[in-house]
Image (tube, rainbow, N blue to C red):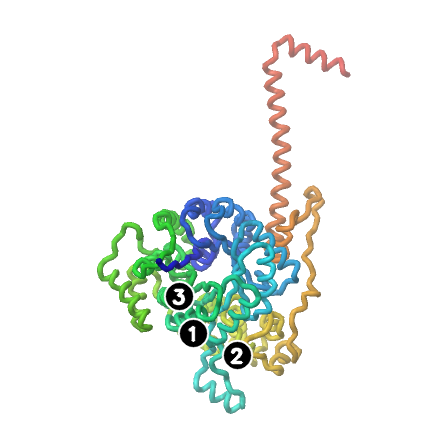
Amino acid sequence: MKRKLLIRDLTLRDGQQSLFATRMNQNQVDKVIPLYKEANFYAMEVWGGAVPDSIMRYLGENPWDRLEKIKAAIGDSCKLTALSRGRNLFGYNPYPEEVIEGFCRYAIQSGIGIMRIFDALNDVDNIKTSIKYVKENGGIADATVCYTVDPHFSSKDRIKALLRAKLLPNNIFTDEYFLNKALEMEALGADMISVKDMAGLIPPARSGELIKLLKQRLKIPVDFHTHCTPGYGLASSLMAIINGVDILDTSIMPFAGGPAAPAYELIQIFCNKLDIETGVNQEVVVKINNILRDIRTEMADVDSYKLFPREFDITRDKLPQDIDNLFELAIAYAKSNKEEELLDCCHKIERYFKFPEPNENVKFAEIPGGMYTNMLAQLKTLKLEKLLPRTLEIIPTVRMASGCPPLVTPTSQIVGVQAVNCIIDENKGQPFYTTKSIQFVNLVKGQYGHTPIPVDPEFRYKIAGVKEETPYDTRNYKKQDNPVFPEYGDVKLADNPKDELLLELFPAVATDFLKNRVINKYLSEIHRVEEEKHQKHLKEKQAYENLSPEEKEKRLLDGLTKF
């Protein structure tokens, strides 16, 4: 009996978010959804992440409508997946239980089958409520371990710390660390565990070791999720397959590679050679691939990479012998755990298919690509991009001082922004942390949860004015206003529970979106009424024109007698 590998397609969420800033509109989605019904992926990630915010903010579309339209088209042919940030859902502030329950309930009612739940601190307490409510509402709870790396300190930094009698810790994020988090999540009732490597920083050997350990100790399926930014993605995915992963995340080729996940087509070639069954309908994928290429052309203005992958029909095109041999060699190197050789093969394969080269800056800095580009953009705005190397240099120090949070959204951005602030302070001759972001203050204070290592009380006092960890108290949560607009017919801003949730989760963006909808609906109603009046007048006019002269005269006399 063939081994089965399940494929979760990321194209319509993570793929387009990584490459095109989540700008795929509903009309574009509608072009491929009917085909996806026949593609036979185990799951499709279509919602959550940046999708709800972006489609309201930039496209003027309702996130619930998008989800429900996809569900209507897909039916039960595969499971729809959403990504949520545990207790924080989509924002920075933790939400009370009623908001989390409402979100889980309506997301599942609207079509979500699998809720992937993560916490940026790997604080299991922050995801237990979501696991509970997803399961209570009939969904599959996909609990996520966020992969990250230890801060990299120079020898000079370690000597300085030693002289201050403050040793810098080693080996925080060990395989055992990730295993223990996974076991805690399994104990809470998680139906599956995902290893989420959003920065693409897990090298192949580590990927193999971690997946093997999780498969040995867990009783539930394991999913592997990574990106290709620093050049590890394809090789690390192959190592995960070799070591028994149950589910693998991929994107269809035009929406894969670079900052996105590995291409499904390349993974399928590996599976064919390994005699592993994915169950995916490859002929349908070819059709989707062709449409996605056109859609990518339509989104050229937001395309992170202008280089298109090579056109490739996995059902018909024959690989050149030297490229086919690279796939065979990569498998052999993966099985013998020869990491450098494996990476070399995979890079040559990706080069043949015209995927972006590994981002060496991200690889060297060991930070997510989005964090790197955001810091650079922040400095460029101030015409201080020359300070980027110094900013990268102090990231480990800032990160360690704040409890060594994993470099995953949003903590990667919080640490990155604060590192830039510190270097700008230094450039002005001011001490570090003269300028502090409110998010950094809240992180150090303990508002987002427990950090992997404790924050020094003295540092917490310096940054946040308190020495003790101070968790966010949801009892103080104030529900967003839902005003009534007398000028538009006494309607509420949000007129149903799902739109009320949008207000809670995205206050500013949802307010603008919903108000525009109120105005447009009001104007549409006025237009409808006026159009009805107009059509009625035209009908009456036409009816009068069709009268005989005698009938017109009689109508005139009848009208006069009324006065």
Total marks placed: 3
Examine the rendered structure and indicate whether residue 26 appears above or below residue 437.
above
Residue located 62% across and 65% down the image: 94
Amino acid at dot 1: Ala
Q: Say left or right for 318 vs 465.
A: left
**Mark 2, mark 3: which one is toward the viewer?**
3
State yes or no: discs 1 and 3 in contact (Cβ < 8 Å).
no
Q: Earlier in the sequence, mark 2 or mark 1?
A: 1
Residue located 40% across and 73% down the image: 209
Q: Earlier in the sequence, mark 1 or mark 3?
A: 3
State yes or no: discs 2 and 1 in contact (Cβ < 8 Å).
no
Q: What is the quadrant of the N terminus in the image?
A: bottom left
Q: CA distance from mark 2 to mark 1?
A: 15 Å
Q: Which residue is mark 3?
A: 244
Examine the rendered structure and indicate whether residue 545 appears above or below residue 307.
above
Nearer-the-camera pick, 423 or 99: 99
Task: Count neighbours of disc 1 (C-alpha within 10 A) and say few if under 14, some if 14 to 19, many if 20 or more.
Answer: some
Q: CA distance from mark 1 to mark 3?
A: 30 Å
Examine the rendered structure and indicate whether residue 319 appears above or below residue 176.
above
From the top left corner, tell me how far across and down residue 368 is, in percent. 45, 68
From the top left corner, tell me how far across and down residue 130 is, in percent. 59, 61
From the top left corner, tell me how far across and down residue 11 is, in percent. 43, 55
Q: CA distance from mark 2 to mark 3?
A: 34 Å
Examine the rendered structure and indicate whether residue 136 appears above or below residue 240.
above
